[in-house]
Amino acid sequence: MKDNIQTSFVMAFLGTGLALQVCGCAKTEVAKTTSHPVKLEAVALKSYLRKYAQESAGEHACGIYYQNTKVGYLITKSKIVQIGGKDFFEVILETQLKMQKDKQDLNAKTIDRKLYQLDGRGELESAERKEDNDGILQTFTLERNKAGYILTDNDTKSKIAVADAVTCLGYEAQISDWLKSKPKVGDKFEHKSAGFSKGKWAETTTTYNYFNGRTIMLHGVPTTIHSLLGSDDTDSSKTHAEVDSNGTLLRGDMGIFSFRFEDISQAKNLSANGLDIVEISRVPLNMDMGETKALSLVVMRVRGLSATPPNSRRQTLLSKGKDGSQAFQIMRDEIKSAGNILSKEENAKYLSDSPSLQIHEPEIKSAAAEAVGQEKNRLKQAQLLMNFVHTRLAKNANRNSEKAVVVLKNAAGDCTEHALVFQSLARSLGMPTREILGMAYVQLPEPAYYWHTWNEIHDGKNWISIDPTWNEIFVDAAHFELEREGEADINMMNSVGQMQIEILSYERGVAQKSIIRKNDSKSIKPKQTKPAKKQITAHSSKKVIEEKKPRIIEEFKGSHFSEVQVEPLPQTRKPNSN
């Protein structure tokens, strides 16, 4: 869209959101949040909106890059259209991602269409999203009615009432006015927007910081470029954008991905790039910790996190370094006698339905009943559900869907789909369940941490960890938790390519109490094992001692997080200490 950066571009990626949102800002010099920023008289406002629509109509494209390799594109087209004798402003946003996932081709395409009124505040008349993830099609619509809006899932035909669409053309139009008003360095603005997200109409508040303005030659014309940094209230995501005074996006960055202004034909020129999104997100290690499921305790130092992961009974923040690093102790989960009873509100939250979970659908109810049979014990039910999901779903990274019913029908998916189906089945049985986002250690082909998703169920006293992909209840110390459902602190996309993990110590066998005292991390030294081929930290200059490894019975393939069977080691390895 050649008008301005008020249009959000959103692409589903790795089960989490890839979003660069640089939208309209309130026309003030101080942070201000309001869903009614335009306060002009009706006639003046109507003229203002039409002028904006006329000046904004056109096309705009950006290529999406990982380093210097193009992996996708974003194209916006906008124009004034007439429907039923009335004029509207139509904005169509098309995004495409073409990469590989676990050595298989991955093609994800999304088309968003928004229709704005050209009177009043420029209210949103309707919106539609079409998703095509390797042939799996989904369509959602938002339509205005007397009470507000109705969100419809065109696949399941389910309908959800939405009170306020939040976004309006009058609000979005002010970005170009603000940019032309010569904002000052350090100015901050808050902006509310809304759009489709995992089958919901989700509201987001974004704060924008004005960094600087400069003049460059663009197509032979002197052009003022503005640098903005946006931060999202739903997580810690940071987006950087450079735009002209009309709001046209010229360049943007989010995590390891960048966006570059191109003509449409150039932007759509996508060829096979061979980039695997699983591999580029891997975090190599400074040592081999052996069999994954045997890990009972891991002490690590992590760099590159934008926030602090939550503490839990199995994961503790030990210290923070001046360099921004954070040290953690992670233990194998185990039964605890002390209780942690959920409040009434928490219980309702972790039993609620969503367009993705579909817990009341007959297919979900039937599958849950099949899995647990006559079992009434909650913990045993959870284990039966875990076994059911692990067995029923093939480990195929390219059969992704955001709907539990579709995943069950396809009978395949990666860790995200396993966690989704488990959560759906568990909640359908009245079992409070939540999703955990994090990383998991994998020994083969090289020691590394990969992005991973698993679950927790509440047994009435405590949260119990369950990994349906690995078929593991009371997960091992290889699971490093970053985010909890509904309590997101760290945006994964911003951490991809930035994170470094240094293993300080580990234990295999029975879980133990903390082996590291507060403010005493220097007493823990890394085990001198044979280093992985790719390093992120320097090793000691001492002679490297090769550690005896267990014999592999079943080869681990790629990054599927398949179960790796190994013969047990003859003894438990303990960390060296002074």
Image (tube, rainbow, N blue to C red):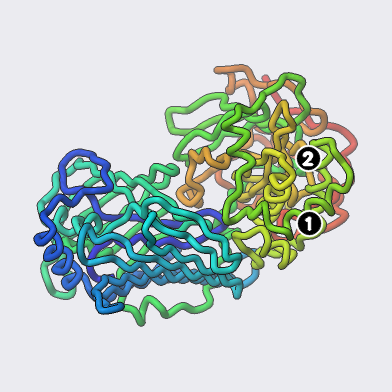
Residue 376 image point, x, y percent: 85, 38
Q: Is residue 349 above or below residue 215?
A: above
Residue 97 image point, x, y percent: 49, 69
Whether residue 255 appears in this view of the structure is no
> What amino acid is labelled 1 in the image?
Ser
Residue 526 image point, x, y percent: 65, 32
Q: Quadrant of residue 77?
A: bottom left
User: Left or right: 348 with respect to 221?
Assistant: right
User: Left or right: 251 with respect to 442?
Assistant: left
Residue located beneath label 2 in the image? 473
- The furthest residue to the front: 146
Camera-side residue of 31 and 283: 31
Q: Residue at x 37, y 51 (%)?
A: 164
Q: Residue at x 28, y 60 (%)?
A: 123
> What amino acid is labelled 2 in the image?
Ile
Q: Residue at x 68, y 43 (%)?
A: 455
* Of labels 2 and 1, the one closer to you: 1
Quadrant that contains the N terminus: bottom left
Quadrant that contains the C terminus: top right
Residue 545 image point, x, y percent: 74, 39
Which numbered tag is attached to residue 295? none
Q: Residues within 10 Å of mark 1 (few under 14, many from 20)?
A: few
Q: Secondary structure at mark 2?
A: strand
Residue located beneath label 1 in the image? 366
